[in-house]
Amino acid sequence: MSTLTAPSATAPPRLYRRFVTSALHKRFVHAALLSLLVALGNAFWLGSNQDLFWSWFPFGPAGIKALLFFLSSLLIFTLQIATLRIGERTTTSPLATFRASFLSAATVQTAILYLMSGWWFTEAYIWSAPDLGWITRGAHNTPDMLNERPIFFRLYALILAVGYAGCHQYRGWSSLRIPISKLPATPSADAKAQDTHALLPVQTRIQQQLITALRRSALASLITFIVAPFINGLFLRNIFWRIHLAVAKLFYNLSRANAHPIGYPPLGFAYLLRCLFAGFLLALTWELTSMLLLEYLCQEPTKSGLPLSAASKDANGTLLTGLKAKRDVVRTFAFWELAIIAQRHKDRRKAIFEDIERPTGPMWTQMMQAGLNVLQELQLRITGPPAAKPGVPETVKPLPRLLPEMQTQSIFAPDSKPSRAERLASPLKQFGSTMQPWHPPIEQTAKQVETRLLEYAKPAGAETKSPSSLLESWTTELRQSRLGWFFNSTNTAKIKATILGTPYGNAAVLVDVIEALTKMQVASLTEDTYGKATPTVPDTVRTFTKTLNLIEDYVARNKQGVVGGIEEVEIIIERLRASLKELLSAFQVYLIDQGLGIAELNQAKKAIQAPSTIPQSQEKPKSKPKPIESRNERKLFQSDKQREGSRDKDGRRKDHNAEVNGRRGSHEIEDVGERNESHEHGRLRLDAPSAWTLPRTTTGGPLFQRREMEHVR
């Protein structure tokens, strides 16, 4: 490994864009070589095959044909590189998708290059086929005729090109989708398990998509084969015939009998099958060309196992230029490389921490700030731009006047009513009073016409509404109709567009920023010799906490109706929470000393808890239904001995009390039975006491009660 040398004090570092471009060129060459093999296959299948050896041998006629077919793929490569983007298109409605996909300059560029590619493929095929010349030679008694077979094949290929241009725009074949991976379920020491982008080898990915490419090519060629004869016969046959006739007259002597096509096109079933097979190979060429370039470009920014910037004399400065780049492709690969350095390359981490003598500040501080800027852009997309502060008007002191002000009042008394000539001339005065004199009359006329049309379209008996309210009601009715799906936006698309960005959502750079900042700061505990990285941890904790809270709140507000489709957003939330938890666990001793407030620390600890988990101490116990309380009976005697009482010497008190108590007890039992029956009829059930004690005294008067209480004592 090459040693990292100290940067020069004056020479600026090489731009990271140069290293990324060099790596992408190398990967483009690999994809182009495979496309050349595809072109060689086209030359074999579409050739004469009279000699089996020369039909495939690359250093011969087959090689020349392959180069001609390869130019068709090269045009698609040019289109992809010119319109390369990172991420998937994020639009909020099908109407917005249509407007962004088909009503842009890139759409025109895509259509032109696909038409050129399809036309060149047909010419390469026609030049190698002896029966597809411009004219059909006649006999000694018949004139030469324009050959309609190549005319139909050119039309068929151009229709297929238009269809694939639309598919290219709609499916985003110029978008480099870098997949992001979830956190491993169990912590692992394996570096591959911690990668932010779980990518299979290129050969494996190509093999997995090969069957899909074959299926799509067959379907597209078959649909075009069915549609092309109708389009040719109904709309474009005469137009293409005249164009070919004008070109053929430059080289051949054709009679006037060729002025118009006659009868049905003399194609034949065998030739139609040849057109179908050639169209299938053309569609397969486009499919494989687009797929090969994207798969080869979607690789780690490494060279021979080392980061791309390691080849620079000032590796850290070069990487910093990539982190601050404006172009999304360069910045994405730069943060991907920083995440790889944070995970695998200890020597580069130490070199970044020890690079503290730059005029612009320590290297790690600048890298960290570049990463936090990415997260702050995400926060700004959620919260919106801050409100503009009202500016203080500047007071301009007027210069002293040399002459008195001119009078603005008319020196002639105006007439009470304007004359007819003035009324006719007043509209003409507007043409000289403004920079655009035609605007006032046109605007007034258009407004009057719009008002009249809205009044005419208003239902009879409806309330009078302003034009704006009528338009709003029409828009609401349109959104609620069967065609409303084309205009309505879904919460899923809204969440992805806000959090991942628009018009293309780049989740890869967000995941790499989170991973790189976390791993680098955790590694600084043992690898930062000068201790310059620890003071930057509070800013990272604050930004992570705020970003996590904003994303979760935004998703919770717009969660209604979201079934799926926000997996990337959920991965970002998961990684933010895990990274924040890792930082708090590693720097819990130093955070307060480095300037993180107690309230901010508590807020961060609260943010790392999943919304669904609530501490048990805060959970309220479930209220159990209260059982029906049994009726409390007032007891006069606490024991049997007290109930028996004391005997008199002659035993009269005992017998008398027993007799009285027996009579009262029987009356009470009858009363209780009557009450129970009444409660059963009212559906109110009360449990009867298990043992009847001495009931309350309801008869006998106060004298008897006083004697009884004295007897108890």
Image: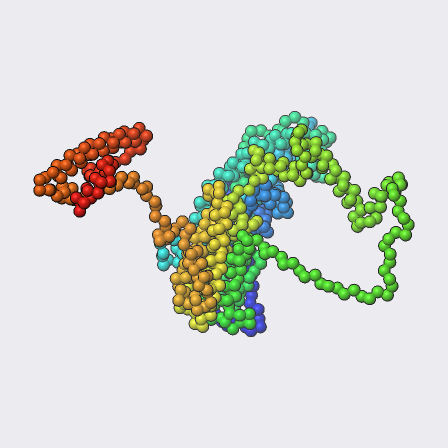
Nearest the viewer among 449 and 503 is 449
Q: Nearer the viewer, residue 633 or 312?
A: 633
Q: Is residue 67 above or below residue 654?
A: below
Q: What residue do we see at 52% from left, 51% from top?
A: 499
| Outermost residue toward the left in this view | 649
Residue 111, horizontal then vertical, whole percent: 62, 43
Give the image location of residue 432, x and y in percent.
83, 48
Residue 325 falls left or right of residue 391: left
Query: As rendered, which of 659 and 417 lies closer to the eye?
Result: 659
**Point 45% across, 50% down: residue:** 570
- From this view, report whether residue 26 is shown above or below residue 440: below
Residue 536 appears at what percent x and percent y?
48, 66
- In the rendered view, would you say 91 is above or below 527? above
Q: Position of residue 487 (x, y in %)?
A: 58, 39
Residue sitting at the far top: 263
| Number of numbered discs overlaid on the protein picture | 0
Image-based side of 198 in relation to 266, left or right: left
User: Which quadrant would residue 478 be assigned to in this image?
Assistant: top right
Residue lying farthest to the right in this orientation:
412
Camera sees residue 321: yes
Q: In percent of the image, x 41 and y 52: which residue is there?
A: 610
Q: How is the image coloured?
A: rainbow
Asked if residue 120 shows in the view, the reply is: no
Instruction: Tell me where residue 237 sits by quadrant.
Output: top right
Q: Residue at x 60, y 56 (%)?
A: 387
Q: Is residue 351 left or right of residue 503?
A: left
The answer to whether residue 16 is above or below residue 654 is below
Task: Check the picture and name the quadrant holding the N terminus.
Answer: bottom left
